[in-house]
Image: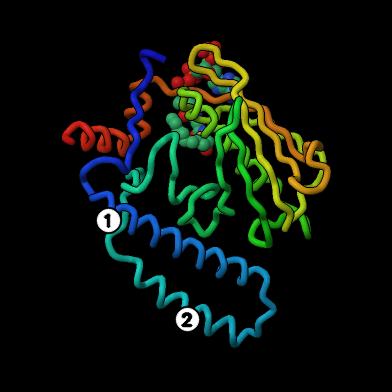
Amino acid sequence: MSDGPRFPRTGTGTGTGTEELEHQKAAITRLGHELRALVEATVRTDASPDTLHRVADGVRTVTGRLTGRRRARGEIPEVDEFPAGPRFYSPVTGAGSPLAPPMRVMAADDGLIGECTLAGTHEGPPGYVHGGVSAMLLDELMGRACAAAGTPGLTVSLQMRYHRPVLLETPLRIIARVTGTDGRKIFVNGSITSRTAAPDASLVTAEGVFVTPDPDSTRALFPGLQRVMARELRG
Ligand SMILES: CCCCCCCCCC(=O)SCCNC(=O)CCNC(=O)[C@H](O)C(C)(C)COP(=O)(O)OP(=O)(O)OC[C@H]1O[C@@H](n2cnc3c(N)ncnc32)[C@H](O)[C@@H]1OP(=O)(O)O
């Protein structure tokens, strides 16, 4: 896409030293891990009201330690590589997000493969994954597949088909593949299967259309990206 927007890899500039950045990533990842354990324990516990109140007090105190300087809305964290690389607070892949499974993403011959195992945090019907969570996993991986193919885009249409319920506590494989482009439109297919039981049977499939915003829209939608590009240019 010769006239499309340029998307730099972020997190590689000189604003923060590499070693410092690696320490930051390790700390973000560790806190994310502990928070996911807390969220899972919270939705699975049978603790007494007294215990829940005491834990709530403790959590409030801990939260107070994180309310200093906050990133502005749309500000891209220095640890991130937007739009094709790791995003530490993505609700799907983010090592630092308490909401993310997190899904691991790997390149495949013709697209991307994601792997994760979901539990109580992402429950819909008792024992099974929430349908909106399945859509979220696919939307993210399909969006990442667009970027990996060199045509980053935003979802304009996501058609979901739920063939079988997706079991919790079962290793899952998510696949996303760009099937074609037409101007700024990118067509993407996706699926979720179990990695252990009947791995050839799709539990969920999706067809998506993504659109690469034109350069003016990109500037308007992502002012944080402009700041990253200016930082990169300054070196
Ligand atoms: C940039 C990289 C970012 C990567 C981050 C990872 C993302 C993970 C996935 C997401 O969560 S994305 C978030 C959810 N999606 C959105 O918030 C997108 C909201 N939509 C928009 O902001 C605008 O639609 C958008 C900027 C993407 C496009 O607006 P445009 O004004 O540039 O597009 P336009 O309306 O001119 O349509 C361009 C083409 O797409 C087609 N199109 C638009 N909406 C469609 C639709 N719903 N279904 C099918 N085709 C559609 C439209 O017909 C047209 O086809 P043609 O070129 O053939 O004429």
**Three-letter amino acid code at disc 1?**
Glu
Residue 9 image point, x, y percent:
35, 35
Q: Distance between the residues labelled 1 and 2?
A: 33 Å
Q: x and y percent of residue 151 in the render?
A: 47, 23
Q: Is residue 17 shown left or right of residue 194? A: left
Nearer to me, 66 or 1: 1
Mark 2 secondary-structure assignment:
helix
Q: Please rate how many residues cluster around mark 2, counting C-alpha atoms within 10 Å: few if below 14, some from 14 to 19, many from 20.
A: few
Q: Please give the residue where the numbered disc 2 appears in the rendered image.
A: 57
102 to the left or right of 190: left
Look at the image and tell me in which quarter the N terminus lies: top left
Q: Residue, x 33% and y 22% (percent of image)?
A: 216
When the figure is inspected, residue 93 is found, relative to residue 177, above or below; the finding is: below
Q: Mark 1 points at which residue?
A: 20
Q: Which element carries disc 1, helix, strand or loop?
A: helix
In the image, residue 163 above or below residue 130: above
Q: Residue at 56% of width from left, 27% of height from top?
A: 156
Q: How crowded is mark 1: few (under 14 residues within 10 Å), some or many (20 or more)?
A: few
Comparing labels 1 and 2, the label whose residue is closer to the camera: 1
Q: Is mark 2 within 8 Å of ligand 1?
A: no
Identify the mark nearer the N-term, 1 or 2. Answer: 1
| Viewer-proximal residue among 1 and 67 | 1
| Quarter of the view holding residue 80 | top left
Most extreme residue toward the left is 234
The quadrant of the image that shows the C terminus is top left
Q: Where is residue 64 drawn, in percent x and y?
A: 36, 72
